[in-house]
Image: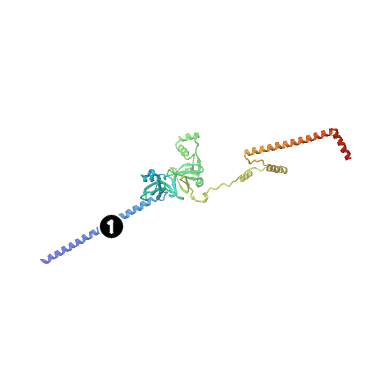
Amino acid sequence: MSPPAEAHKSKKRKHAAAAEGAGAAEPSTKRSKKDKDGAKDAKRKKGAKEDKGKGRATDDAFRVVRASLTVSVPPAFAADLRGGVEELLDSMLVRYIPALQGVVLVHDRLEFLDNVATIKADCPSSNCRVAFDATVWSPQVGMKLSGKINLCSPDHISLLVHRTFNVSIPRHHITTDSYEFEYGPAENDPEFGGAQDEGADGERAQEDMEHGGGRWVHKITGTKLGDADGHLEFTVVGLTIANQMLSLVGSIQPDPFSPEHVPKASLTTVSTASRKAAASQPPSAPLSEREVDAMIDDDDDDDDDDDGSDMDPFGKLGKMGDEAERRAREAQEAEARKEKKRKRKEAKVQEGATPEGAGEKKIKKKKKS
């Protein structure tokens, strides 16, 4: 009886040992699962952070910049430095800041870099170093954007990007091979009022008036430039900064940076224009030699005369007055000479009439003989 009991006891010991081994192994597997789950959560959080960072630095014109600067807070905000700094940052909104290379739209996460503010010399303002996140609109040359057309003219197309920023597309950056400008009705046109009541024609006339009295349409299909809502995609070819305001120069050409789209200055001068006008006139009859000589003499007289045709009216009047004085003086001198000659003749006549004068004449005649 004893051997079976011992065998039974040994079997129980084996089962207990197996159970203990299983129990010991089970916690280890549970810990490994937790570790795996923790690793997955860490990866997921890391991926979320990476995605969040990528979302903050997008590829379009909007981007977030961490900026730092030193500001001088007026004494009125001595009790509330944060409020003073925020007010100073508000003054930078919707302005082009060269250091940030864009237009500041929003500032957030304001942080003071020092625990204390400093006051220098006699200046009562508090100097603080701060850091903040700035959301800026920073378009770059070569970037493709979309704006809504708000003005059309034969020289350019004006657009608004995000209903705020101005864009101008000059004529040499418009595909004039495919599109042409179509003038709209005038405001005082009697047919304009009737066209408004005719459905589609009225809507078209209203659009033309909103777009500056005309629009750009396709030469073949007649469809207007842009989509149904008036939006047009363009390429940024230039930036214009004036009074801390940013405006863009766009192009809708397939190759906007080609030298062919650079406007050429007009080289037509007055001389070339006069030559063209003379060439366009019909040939006249040949002039005789006498007429040619007379024309040359007239030109010489004009050159020698120097009547001051290039002078202003006051200069001409002054010169005319000087000329009149000169002529009057010459006339007086001529009159004085005539008077002297007349008096000399009278004196001679009187001397010849007296007997003494006659005797002197006879003596002179005898001496001569």
Q: Is mark 1 on a helix, strand or loop?
A: helix
Residue extending farthest to the bottom is: 3
Quarter-of-image position of residue 312: top right
Viewer-side residue, 170 vs 238: 238
Residue 259 x, y percent position in the rendering: 52, 51
Q: Mark 1 points at which residue?
A: 35
Which colour scheme appears in the figure?
Answer: rainbow
Q: Report the label total.
A: 1
Viewer-side residue, 336 vs 206: 336
Residue 327 x, y percent position in the rendering: 70, 37
Residue plotted at (14% across, 64% down): 9
Residue 49 appears in the figure? yes
Quarter-of-image position of residue 28: bottom left
Residue extending farthest to the left is: 1
Q: In this view, does 187 lie above or below 123?
A: above
Q: Is residue 53 above or below residue 305?
A: below
Residue 286 appears in the figure? no
Viewer-side residue, 336 vs 251: 336
Q: As drawn, is 355 to the left or to the right of 15?
A: right
Residue 131 x, y percent position in the rendering: 38, 50
Quarter-of-image position of residue 44: bottom left
- Quarter of the image with the N terminus is bottom left
Residue 269 x, y percent position in the rendering: 60, 46
Q: What is the three-letter code of the residue carrying label 1?
A: Asp
Q: How crowded is mark 1: few (under 14 residues within 10 Å), some or many (20 or more)?
A: few
Q: As drawn, is 214 to the left or to the right of 333?
A: left
- Quarter of the image with the C terminus is top right
Residue plotted at (88% across, 40% down): 367
Viewer-side residue, 283 vs 331: 331
